[in-house]
Each structure stands twice: as C-alpha cells, then as structure tokens.
Image (spheres, rainbow, N blue to C red):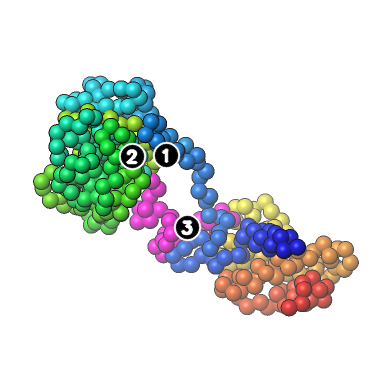
Amino acid sequence: MRTALTLTIIATSASLAQQPFYGDPPDANHPWAVHDRNRPQPPVITPAEFPRDEKPGTPPSDAIVLFDGTEASLQNWLRDKKPTEAITWEVVDGALQCKPKGGYIRTKENFGDVQLHVEWSAPTPPKGKSQGRGNSGVFLMGMAEVQILDNFQNPSYPDGSAGSLYGVNPPMANPLRAPGQWQSYDIIFRRPLHDDAGKLIDPGYMTVMVNGVLVQDHQPLEGGGGHKKRSVTKKFPNAGPLKLQDHGNPVRFRNIWLRELPPRNVEGGTQGKMSEEATLAQRDAIARDILDKAADKKGMERMTLLYESLTYAANPTAHQEADALADAFVAKLEASEGEALEAMKQNAIGLRNNLKYLVKHNRISAPEGNITKLQAVIDAQEWEPKK
Ligand code: MG
C-alpha cells in the first residue's frame, strides 16, 4: 500500500516536472525557469575510465585524443622549435618518451580553455636530484606550466614541485607515486580574458588534480609563471598549442586527451547567473523558439505554447491570442455536458493551473473571468478532492 502511494506521488511530481508553468520563472539574471525543460540537455557522453598502474585510462567519448599509445597519434605533435621536422620523441611500449635534446613538442592544433588529462611516469631507477630528476612539464597554450617532476622523496623548491603552477604556486599536497609508476594529471585551464579596451576582466585559472588529489584550486594564473622571474598578468591569445617539456629527462607519457570548455559568461556563456543584458537576449531567443513551435499548432496546444512564451518575454500579440483561445475553451467547457464535458477535465484543470502560475508571476494581469469560470466548473463537477 505504502509502495503504491509512493509510486503515485513520484509519478505525479515527475509528470509535473515535464511541464512548463512549474518552477519559478525566468528573472533578470536567469533566462531559464527553475527546472526548465527548454534548457538544452547536457550532451550524453561515455565517461573516462580511471587508469591503473599497468593499464592507461580511456578518454571520455567527446575528448580530443592527442596520444593513445600508437605511432599514428604522433601525427598530432610537432617539434616546437623546428615544426617542419618530425619529432624525435619515441613511442616505447605504448608510451610517448621524451628524447633528451629532442626539444619541446607541441600539438599541431591550438586550444583555448580545456579540461586536460595526462598520465606520466618518471625514469627508474631515478637519476639526479631536485629539479634534475624526472623533470618535464605541461604548458597550457604553451604559456602556463603545470610542473612534472619526480619529487617523490626528492625535495625541491615547492613552487617547482609536481603539480605546481611553476613559479607561481606550490601544490597543496604531494600525492606522487614512486618513479616508474604512473601518475595522472587532470587539469582545468581557463585563459585570462581582456575586454576590447585591454582591461583584464578575468585573470585566468588553473585547477589541478594529481592522482585524483586536488593540488591547485581555481588558482589565478598571474601570467602563467616562469623560471626565476615573477610573472605578471599578460594577454593570452584565444588559443595556443599544448606543449610538453624536454628538460633532459626521458619522462614517459600516455593517454593524453582534452576537452574544450564552453565559454564563460563574460564571453557569451550561459552558465548559472548571467548579466541582465545576456539574460534578456536569451529569454527572447527561447520565447521565439516556443512561438516557432506554436506556428503549426491549433487550439489548446497553441494556447499553451503562447502562454509559455510569455514566461520568457512579454508579447502583447501572443498574449491577446492566447487569451482569445482561452476564452473559446472556457465557453465550450461551459456549454458542454456529459461525456464531452468529462473529456475536457484534464485540460480545464491544466489551464486553471497555468493561468494561476502566470498571474502569480506577473506574466498576465489579474484573472478577469477565466480562472473563476474554470474553478466553478471544476467545483461543480467535483473534479478535485475537497481540501
Ligand atoms: Mg618542468
């Protein structure tokens, strides 16, 4: 009994959540209603698999794969300083191994803001100490280095440790495994943004997980760092190549992939709270889409879409036509009896609910007539349990 009741409640709330006129409507900073079904669905992707020491992870299905263990994926890379020559780094047992004196390598393609995954392994037995052991690096847009270093039981300066934003900020922890074992980096990179007048509007950020442990938390780039010199905030282009460093150590890499990130709201994105101007434009676009959907619809369906459009943008023409369709429905309801009347029950209750929502949220003016008339029929027919 309890199970059946619970199921009914779940089914009711699930079907309500499919409807417009449900959660709080759009406002000055949110172009979508709460629980809005007109909001684009997140794309469905197959997730990444986590790596284990003997086995690389796999990229998620929407990733741009830069190295997958094959010779073929070397075509994604160029010698940084001599881009017309083939890279001298080698594929050894499915890993891309840095060739000392082979120079930095960089991707052929340019990227801006990304989520980046890299797995790497330092040479074993370890040779050298401090910055001389297992040193490489991941350069986002070729400009900001997340340090790769074998500082497992090998201290060096903190802002040059593995997972540091090199020369800017040390990692919050040292979760490294021993040399020879595989380490994973997951990096979220946002480049600095300037407006047309050259004013900084977003400093750019780096978030880094080393072996699943957070070591950089939305860390401002401060220009991206560098060796010995205090870096200062500077302009980045819109995109640049990903670079891997040759620091003279045969560090190995595997399973390198990235996903390009959607724009931030200051550059036209639509996440969370938006500017009033962008919200208005987005609300207008959603209302237009709904009106397009209404174009070949008639009667109740058309009326509902016209009213729905009003939750996003005022539109006297749509408002007037929706009211006329509502008037016609109510007149027909009042003139019907028996089975014909019963067949209109769900639509009558639905319209009453929608009109009350629109009045409550100031999308239409006070309920002259139709809400009262609908309620009178609903009460006379005892279509709803008495409260
Ligand atoms: Mg380095």
Q: In the image, which is nearer the foreground, mark 2 or mark 3? A: 2
The alpha-carbon separation of the residues under discs 2 and 3 comes to: 39 Å
Query: Circle 2 is placed at which residue position?
Result: 184
86 is within the stretch colored magenta: no
Residue 38 vs 359, above or below: the answer is above
Work out whether residue 316 or residue 126 is closer to the camera in this orientation and state it.
Answer: 126
Numbered circle sitting on residue 50: 1
Marks 2 and 3, the one that precedes in the sequence: 2
Which corner quadrant holds the N terminus? bottom right
The alpha-carbon separation of the residues under discs 2 and 1 comes to: 9 Å
Query: Circle 3 is placed at which residue position?
Result: 282
Few, some or many residues within 10 Å of mark 2 (<14, 14–19, 20+): many
The alpha-carbon separation of the residues under discs 1 and 3 comes to: 38 Å
The amino acid type of the residue labelled 1 equals Phe
Looking at the image, do the residues carrying marks 2 and 1 touch, with CB atoms under 8 Å apart? yes
Which picture quadrant has residue 299?
A: bottom right
Main secondary-structure element of the magenta-colored stretch: helix
Q: In the image, which is nearer the foreground, mark 1 or mark 3? A: 1
Residue 321 visible in image: no
The region drawn magenta spans: 261-290
Q: Residue furthest left?
A: 228
Which picture quadrant has residue 121?
A: top left
Residue at 16% x, 26% y: name it.
101
Q: Position of residue 359 (x, y in %)?
A: 61, 74
